Image (cartoon, helix red, strand yellow):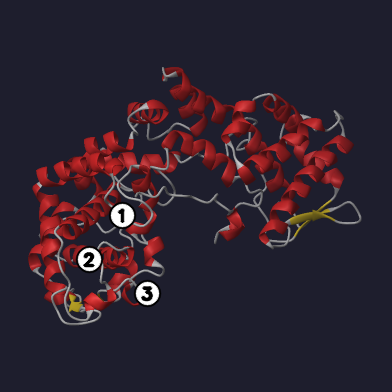
Amino acid sequence: MYLSQFFTEYDDTLSQNLNIDPLGMTMIWSALGQRIFKNRVSSISNDVRNYTLNLVHHLAIKELVDSSIRLTGQVSNLYPNIDSLSFKQACLIHAENLFVYSMLEGSNQADKQVGTLGILGASKGRKKQNSDGKFNATLTFTHTAKSNLLVRQLTLGVSGRYKTPFIEMQFFDKEYRYKHPNFEPSWRLASELVDSRPALKQVKEHLKQHFKVLLSTDSKEPQCCFSDVMPALKEAYTLAFATPEVVGSLTKEFWLSITGLNQGAAGTLYDVIEAHKQDSEQPLKPEQLFNIALSKCEDKEEKHKLQQIIDVEPFLAECEMLFRLVMSERIQSSEDLYEKYLELGRTSDTLPNLASSLVDKIAIQQVLTGIANGRYKKLLKLAQLPSEDDQHGFIKVVQHLLRYHAEIMIRRGQSTWVEQDNKGNFRCNIKLAKEPNKSNSPINTWYHRYYINEFHQLISGLEGQAQTVQQT
């Protein structure tokens, strides 16, 4: 019997990055953005090399499990069932560490063109490097933290970051169970890809052989020194995964097809980005990109996804801009704050009018669920404020926004960033924000980017363009 997967709603009270989203809008804009990208692209999954590395590693492990390999000795006591989550996690961590050290060692060799930018764990891996450019790291086969090169590697490593997209593409469930009728088409396509690309196939085959040798040792937690790892496996990694561009040249059509990123709204955005890739001096702003895509998208439902973002973002961006304005001084009087707002070309009706334009667009509210839906509706209550084109009306808008902010922070168990004191002044309790100005914050300027930067990153690898990844 096959079990359905159950996913809990994202809760930003559990996030480690609470200091960057004081209005809790990530839940709103990300829900709208992921309607387009379907969890294939995110802030942590946007690199074609890592996508493909995860695919090859899982395929090697799947074939190892399907071969009914039998573990013996002490390791069989720890992993009596090789089709278990813990065994597969141990394999994934071990393979990722092998990859990191292979790539770092290869980058030190003049005859290899290996790029390490964007390799997760590269910084920590370099600490194991000898003066001769070799690595003497000991790799332990276990699913526990003892084997981790990265802190919390099961979550922050390649397999963790790309787990959700692979679940969505039906490669496995959250327990890494590969066997399910719904998963067979994805694995068939993956096998066809890897086996038709000699460079990728070499990695898979050598990795399987490495595991067979490693797991034949009579140890509870098998170990190997990286210097003793078969050279053919190291070589295979550096050839197949030399750079994201190399990987993109091998896998572009596969990834575009299986992710569906060449279809619908995402496909239209892809086409617009590619059509304007030469405009490096004046790249398209997100609002320009979405509007061009809207004019070119032919599918009615997909067009609607673009339109909803185009409708919502000016309102969300204005809320963010006003909040940053309140944060731009340690203490501001109501009069001073109002004057600054007017200088930005706004009035006390700017936000209420934007909210009013969205109230009847019920379809947007239906997209948002749970906490995100509640937050969006609370922001839309700005439309209910009485129209007062003066300082008094403006202060009511600010007070509404600050009450909303306070609710967010209370839910997180944190203090408010800004508040109004008993004298009517507005106080900022944390580091000041840069004050918006009219030139960089005209009305209808977008603040959130709806994964467009990450989509650009993925496209650059698929199309063999220069990467701008931050090294980890």
Give the mark nearest the N terminus, 2 or 3: 2
Quarter placement of the C terminus? bottom left
Measured along the vertical axis of the image, is residue 197 above or below residue 277? below
Where is residue 46 shown, x and y percent of the image? 36, 47
Query: In screen coordinates, is 299 left or right of 408?
Result: left
Q: How far, Cα to Cα, is label 2 from label 1?
A: 32 Å
Q: CA distance from mark 3 to mark 1?
A: 22 Å
Q: Amino acid at mark 2?
A: Leu
- Report the residue at 69% width, 62% height from top: 414
Q: Which residue is mark 3?
A: 145
Q: Quadrant of residue 356?
A: top right
In this view, 37 is above or below 82: above
In this orientation, does residue 442 appear? yes
Q: Is residue 279 left or right of residue 57?
A: right
Which element is circle 1 on?
loop
> Along the polypeptide, which appears first: circle 3 or circle 1?
3
Q: Position of residue 98 (x, y in %)?
A: 22, 67
Q: In the depicted view, which residue is nearer to us: 225 or 145?
A: 145
Q: Which residue is mark 2?
A: 104
Residue assigned mark 1: 177
